[in-house]
Amino acid sequence: MIKPLSVLSGLLLAAALPFTPAAAQVGAATAASPGDPAARPFIEDLVGSGFAVLRDKALAKPAARAKFRDLLTRNVALDDIGMRLIRRQRASLSPAQLEAYRAAFPEFVLNAYADRLYDYADARVQVQRTVGRGPYTEVYTRVTRPGAQPVDTIWQVKSDGGKLMVNNLIVGGVNLALTQEADFSAYIAKNGFDALVAFMKSANAKSLAVQRP
């Protein structure tokens, strides 16, 4: 079974992981450059918007899903992430296969954790620092929940045509993009690429059916 990880849902899922000091996750963050100064408020706004949706009791789930979809589309480099997950297979794929994958991937990411997000509505995220690493700015945050160990997370932010976008997330030392790539590769090796796309389409259709009154 594929276990998709999205950026927003990965953050909220962090509360279930054991605490790992930030320095141990990717090595001590000793780089002198703080990176793009706009990265910190960008992440603060994104996280705040996401949790505002979770905590809005008057918001029905279909409307909440629409808001999450908008957040993902505007703030996460979904196409870049999706292409990275199949980088080993991409050269052998036809244009039609790539188009089908790109069409199914964003909705699949959203559907994977949409209903689980509400379990983490009581989480709190604090931005600690930013570190510049080449073309990216890493925004270090700590996730806390009542009665749970804190978890350090690292948001990788890049500028895409002058607009900041989330490119990856490390949660409790787990690189979500690398983990998802390995999961996709294993599924493709066993079932084929077309089966992966069919699986995503089927999951999307089932989710849509559940949302209908």
Image (cartoon, helix red, strand yellow):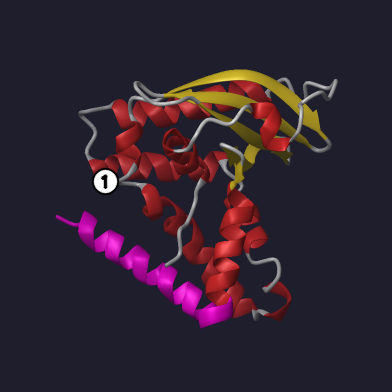
Judging by the rendered image, the residue that carries numbered circle 1 is 62
Tell me if 108 is positioned left or right of 126 in this view: left
Q: Which residues are magenta?
A: 189-213
Comparing 15 with 111, the one in front is 15
Residue 31 located left or right of residue 205: right
Does 151 sit above or below residue 128? below
Q: Is residue 90 magenta?
A: no
Residue 192, image x, y percentages: 55, 82
- Of residue 15 and residue 59, the one placed in the foreground of this image is 15
Indicate whether 8 appears above or below 104. Answer: above
Q: Is residue 19 above or below residue 6?
A: above
> Regarding mark 1 in the picture, which secondary structure is present there?
helix
Q: Where is residue 18 drawn, in percent x and y? A: 49, 35
Which residue is pictured at 47% across the width and 36% down the height? 14
Left or right for 41, reference 27: left
Quadrant of the rendered structure where residue 2 is? Answer: bottom left
**Residue for point 64% across, 22% down:** 40
Which image quadrant: the N terminus?
bottom left
Amino acid type indicated by mark 1: Pro
Residue 173: image quadrant is top right
Res 148 visible: yes
User: Of helix, strand and loop, which mostly describes the magenta segment?
Assistant: helix
Looking at the figure, which quarter contains the C terminus? bottom left
